[in-house]
Image: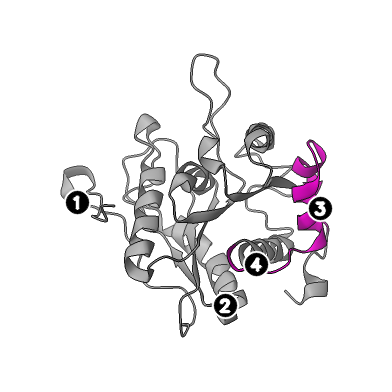
């Protein structure tokens, strides 16, 4: 497997993994890669704001998984645009997973992305090192009968959780439901949570979303038992397991 960096336009940019977020661990047992939001089409460089927005979740996951040797990185893309068939953010995410393998060896990896980063996480899940995918308010293209649907075959064999606010005005919650519905047909380890009354940034229920993320990552990468709502969501048939409400106070009873 090649691990060379992807070169950006004119050789000016390449994706970067950077240093781990949070405190160091004695031995790396798993890695979570945070994929920031992006834009459908853009030739501009990566967004500092989107990168900064991903850091708190990365830091919280690293803290929750420290005893298991969890390392968190926020991926720095070549640029902020998906750019059609180039699917640049997904390509950068795949490169980042390969870089994890180069640095840390054969460790399980979770891809966790928001918005356009959520789409990148779902697309890049086919990398052999990826065990799990967390897509927060993923940006997905509108249904188009003339175009191929967003792929889901690469999600087979991975645990997949999608989280979406019902009042999201930037990314359509119904599109993430349709994708999860298709994914569930070939991968039973797929579920989706709806955060009622919340928007794209999931600010109103930020603590619950972070607790869910930690519960999922630690369970998927290290075999910790899932919280009951998450276990029920995986087990429930559609549409129940794909429209599972994220209850207020999730995670408090487990100390997260």
User: What residue sits right under mark 2 in the picture?
Assistant: 68
**Marks 3 and 4 close (CB-CB < 8 Å):** no
Mark 1 or 3, which is nearer the eye? 3
Task: Determine the residue positioned at 48% across, 41% down.
Answer: 123
Label 1, label 3: how many angstroms apart (C-alpha)? 47 Å
Residue 236 vs 98, above or below: the answer is above
Residue 24 relative to residue 6: left or right: right
Residues rendered magenta in the picture? 221-247
Mark 3 or 4, which is nearer the eye? 4
Task: Determine the residue positioned at 46% across, 81% down.
Answer: 27
Task: Report how many numbered discs are placed on residues in the image.
Answer: 4
Q: Which tag, 2 or 1, sits closer to the chain's start? A: 1
Q: Label 3 crowding class (10 Å Cα cut-off): few <14, some 14-19, many 20+?
A: some
Q: Position of residue 216 (x, y in %)?
A: 66, 61
User: What residue sits right under mark 4 in the picture?
Assistant: 223
User: What residue sits right under mark 3 in the picture?
Assistant: 232
Label 3, label 4: how many angstroms apart (C-alpha)? 16 Å
Q: Label 4 crowding class (10 Å Cα cut-off): few <14, some 14-19, many 20+?
A: few
Quarter where residue 247 is shown: bottom right
Residue 254 vs 191, above or below: the answer is below
**Marks 1 and 3 close (CB-CB < 8 Å):** no
Task: Determine the residue positioned at 46% across, 73% down.
Answer: 21
Label 4, label 2: how many angstroms apart (C-alpha)? 10 Å
Query: Does the magenta segment cover residue 103?
Result: no
Residue 231 relative to residue 82: left or right: right
């Amino acid at each position: 497997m090649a691990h060379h960096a992807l070169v950006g336009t004119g050789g000016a940019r390449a994706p970067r993994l950077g240093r781990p977020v949070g405190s160091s661990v004695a031995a790396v047992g798993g890695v979570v890669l945070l994929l920031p939001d992006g834009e459908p089409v853009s030739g501009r460089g990566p967004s500092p704001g989107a990168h900064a927005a991903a850091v708190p979740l990365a830091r919280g996951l690293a803290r929750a998984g420290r005893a298991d040797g969890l390392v968190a990185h926020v991926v720095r893309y070549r640029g902020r645009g998906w750019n059609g068939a180039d699917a640049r953010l997904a390509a950068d995410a795949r490169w980042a997973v390969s870089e994890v393998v180069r640095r840390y060896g054969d460790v399980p990896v979770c891809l966790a992305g928001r918005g356009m980063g959520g789409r990148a996480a779902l697309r890049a899940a086919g990398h052999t090192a990826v065990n799990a995918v967390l897509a927060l308010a993923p940006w997905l293209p509108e249904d188009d009968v003339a175009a191929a649907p967003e792929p889901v075959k690469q999600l087979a064999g991975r645990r997949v959780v999608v989280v979406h606010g019902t009042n999201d005005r930037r990314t359509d919650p119904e599109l993430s439901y349709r994708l999860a519905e298709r994914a569930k047909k070939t991968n039973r380890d797929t579920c989706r949570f709806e955060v009622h009354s919340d928007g794209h940034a999931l600010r109103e229920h930020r603590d619950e979303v972070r607790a869910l993320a930690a519960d999922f990552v630690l369970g998927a990468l290290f075999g910790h038992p899932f919280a009951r709502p998450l276990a029920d969501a995986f087990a429930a048939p559609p549409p129940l397991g794909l429209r599972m409400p994220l209850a207020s106070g999730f995670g408090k009873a487990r100390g997260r």
